[in-house]
């Protein structure tokens, strides 16, 4: 049985991946506080909560999608992390970052457009 993955399915996977990248944001915020201070513990707690939610959602994704599709889409974590670094932490984006993202997305499009 051959079928294509739909745009809706890709969006659902991407929503889970965006959730996962939020854990990195919480971790970066935690790093700005003194070890074991209340804000540090709150950020780490938030990070663990996000990772727990992501783990449950990811288990459902890999149950419903071929692993080749699910895991190739995880590569977009680089894009989302770069976007958050720019928007939230005012980090610089270089042409090498953009080139890397283009290469990653090209590979994802090739895999996602293939029939299985």
Image: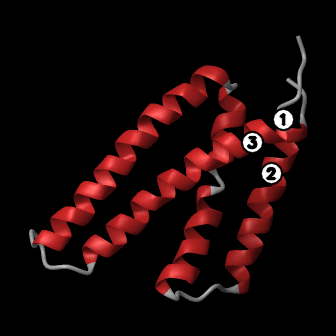
| Separation (CA) of disc 3 from disc 1 | 6 Å
Judging depth in this view, the residue of 84 and 114 nearest the camera is 84
Give left or right: position of 92 versus 49. right
Q: Which residue is mark 3?
A: 10
Q: What secondary structure is marked by label 1? A: loop
Asked if residue 65 is positioned above or below residue 48 in the image, the reply reads above
User: Which one is in front, 99 or 51?
Assistant: 51
Q: Which residue is mark 1?
A: 6
Q: Position of residue 27 (x, y in %)?
A: 33, 66
Among the two numbered marks 2 and 1 on one chain, the one whose residue lies closer to the N terminus: 1
Front in this rendered view, residue 15 or 101 = 15
SS type, badge 2: helix
Helix, strand or loop for disc 3 = helix
Identify residue for label 2.
107
Q: Give the alpha-carbon distance from disc 3 to disc 2, as whole Å.
A: 14 Å
Query: Which callout, 3 or 2, points to the residue nearer the camera?
Result: 3
Q: Please report contact status of discs 3 and 1: CB closer than 8 Å, yes or no.
A: yes
Residue at x 64%, y 85% (from the top left corner): 93
Q: Nearer the viewer, mark 2 or mark 1?
A: 1
Q: Quadrant of residue 1?
A: top right
């Amino acid at each position: 049985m051959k079928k294509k993955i739909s745009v809706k399915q890709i969006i659902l996977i991407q929503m889970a991946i965006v959730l996962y990248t939020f854990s990195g944001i919480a971790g970066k915020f935690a790093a700005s506080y003194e070890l074991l201070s209340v804000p540090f513990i709150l950020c780490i707690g938030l990070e663990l909560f996000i990772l727990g939610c992501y783990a449950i959602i990811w288990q459902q994704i890999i149950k419903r999608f071929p692993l080749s599709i699910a895991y190739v889409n995880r590569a977009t974590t680089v894009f989302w992390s770069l976007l958050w670094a720019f928007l939230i932490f005012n980090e610089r984006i270089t042409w090498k970052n953009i080139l890397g993202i283009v290469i990653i997305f090209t590979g994802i499009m090739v895999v996602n457009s293939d029939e299985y």
